[in-house]
Amino acid sequence: MRREMREHVPSVLVATLSAAFGVSLLEITAVLGQIIAADDVTGRSKTVGILLGIVAFVFIVISIYVGAIVTANTFATIIAGRTRTIALLRLIGSSAASQRRGVAHEGLTVGILGAVLGVVSGTAVTVVVVTIATATRFVPSLPYTFVEPVVLLPAVAVVLTTWLASWVGSRRVLLVSPIQATGGAVEKSRDEVSGRRGRNVTAVVLFSVGAGLLGLGVLVGLVNPGGVLIGLVGGILSFTGLVLGAHLVMPPALRLTGRMFGSSATARLAAENAVRYPERSSRTTIGLVIGVTLITMFAVAVASYQQMILAAQRSQPEAYQGVDQTLAITVGVFSVLMGFSALIAAIGMVNNLSLSVLQRTRELGLLRALGFTARQVRRMILAESAQLTVAAVLVGLVLGVFYGWAGAQSLLGSIHGSPGLIVPAVPLLLIGIVVAGAAVLTLVASIAPSRRATRVAPVAALAVD
Amino acid sequence: MQTHNAAFDHDEAGLVARVSRLTKSYGAGSNAISALDGVSIGIRRGEFTAIMGPSGSGKSTLMHIMAGLDTATSGQAWLGNTEITSLRDEDLTILRRRRVGFVFQSFNLVPTLDVSGNILLPFELDGRRPARDEGEWIDRLIDSLGLRDRLRHRPHELSGGQQQRVAIARALATRPDLVFADEPTGNLDSRTSREVLSLLAASSTDYGQSIAMVTHDPIAASYADRILFLADGRVVEERGRSTAEEISSFMLGMEKAA
């Protein structure tokens, strides 16, 4: 039981982060609303308040969605690791359905625990941020109210989505056959994975429909800010398509980056390892793709938003007085909150890499026996980690630029004095930060696995299980 | 790396490996379990030697220490004239890479590399390509082991016997001082077992490859030039080439005596 709870630490952390993110975002939006209402210039214009509300809603939906995907993936990974135990229980006579219900029950517990922790820590973060902001006179000192009943919404949503995610992630339980208790369970090879027609079709359809809606959102956005809502639906659908079809998208991306590491034995083995279980490496990287996409999307959206607001400001200076400050606050606050999704992704990545090393003990022992030095093993793990990060970052950057542009475009295409369609504004500083962050993540993610890998004795290769 | 021992030249004695008063125990104090209890043996150059014994006799531990995979509690082990129990991990690794070959029970190929990649792995680990004469040797091995049309296959596409032939090719590719085989037929059917054992025996007679094979199977041991029997961490008997029947009856006698 204790071991099971330990396996769930990443999921609890993810649920906590999503709940904290939602709660904090709602509270900060409320605070921003109060600042804007108190301001003479912006207070008169209702548009800003409505826009803020929409933006907050969009971000909360996104954060909960990310949390759910990472949780579903984490659960799938946990189940993969538990295959033997599940098979043994099935062998003794437990039904697959009851096994799956058990996993879903764990998911509910994780969700509730995460939501409670999230409400508490999210509120704490908001209070600290606002206190600091008021103390430094960054925002005016007003009698802010933090805890409103509405903050329970993201908490409830996190509980429900975590529960749902654990149910979806535990699908594999149904595939475990009792006989697997007696032998080693093998993950599906690439051919089998690609062969799953239904899932692939769903992924492609979702992606196409979503992309279409996203385009529609951008067009509608040219006349009405409501276009962003169409765009949101399109974004979620198309991204869900990408996540579902990750096993089609990620392995080629991984293969491509694998070539960048040269042709030494270490690099070639690392490149092959990164794609040997396409399902698993897709799972590992998709979390990071989501994180990078989100951060990039947000930064590009804000940069494009700034670009559009500035253009609008130039053409109608009187209507946009005082917007600069609000914008600065928005950027500051959201940038901090956005770091959360990267954290969620990092947890998933470290977890998966550790697991893959753990399941390769035998092979690592073989390499050591055949003459791989400890240093070569360490370099191999580092290269694997780097390959996963680089592929995820590249895909995430491309997607993020596109989604961010679509978001800003559909939200602001219709505001007074807007230039209409714009080229996405890509903040270079952001790309620098993302790349640096990815480098740090690569190193951090490889520390524990490579320590474990170098500790594998060559004799492990000779052990018969 | 050659540390000459003035008192004993292994090359002159025709020995490719030797251990002297080797002990290995697990645990400490009154709980200590002794896996090897003062074992001293020599493996002759160019011969196919079988190390036999029932489960728990210490034969695997002995092989692990001789191959530089495990450390001894006391005593010494030489590969050629190199005393290996005092080597650091890095030097041991390079020694295994260049001077030792392995064939394991569970085939143990790297699943992500194809047949050719697996055979060339020891060279790749060394960061070099096979030299011209090495290339010719490997070509000969590939042909004689019947792997020519399998070079681009991955291990999971091969039968057990084919996988073990790939492992043998890999073990022989670097022309190591000594090939260690650990129950090489343990996972094979009897026909494939005979084939693999004949290949090992042939590489010894035809190419002068020194081989040390750990096994508990009398039929496997009957392919060897020389058989060492271990029981309870000690060498109890040494015999020349014997039939499976002779080996079996000796093993049974050992069991009864115990």
Image: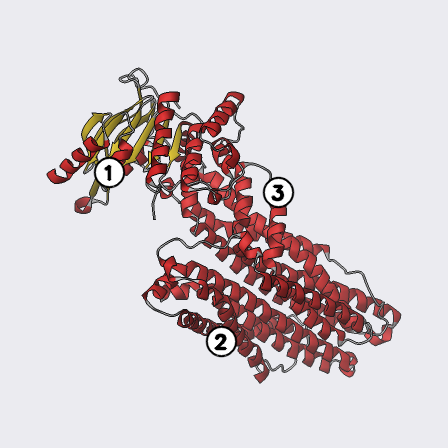
**Residue B96 appears in the rendering:** yes
Q: Residue at x 49, y 56 (%)?
A: A352
Find out whether the residues at labels 3 and 1 contact each other: C-beta distance under 8 Å: no
**Horizontally, is B24 left or right of A251 in the view?**
left
Identify residue type, mark 1. Gly
Extreme-right residue of the structure: A315
Are discs 3 and 1 both within one chain?
no
Identify residue type, mark 2. Val
Which residue is denoted by mark 1 in the rendering? B58
Q: Residues within 10 Å of mark 1 (few under 14, many from 20)?
A: many
Q: Using the image, tell me which numbered label, if any, was put on residue A116.
A: 2
Q: Helix, strand or loop at disc 2?
A: helix
Q: Helix, strand or loop at disc 3?
A: helix
Report the number of discs. Answer: 3
Which residue is denoted by mark 3 in the rendering? A259
Identify residue type, mark 3. Arg
Q: Residue at x 46, y 74 (%)?
A: A108
Task: Write down the chain letter for disc 3.
Answer: A
Camera-nearest residue between A72 and A406: A72
Camera-nearest residue between A411 and B53: B53
Task: Write down the chain letter for disc 1.
Answer: B
**Label 3 vs label 1: CA separation?**
45 Å
**Horizontally, is A44 left or right of A459 in the view?**
right
B139 is higher (above) or lower (below) than A53: above
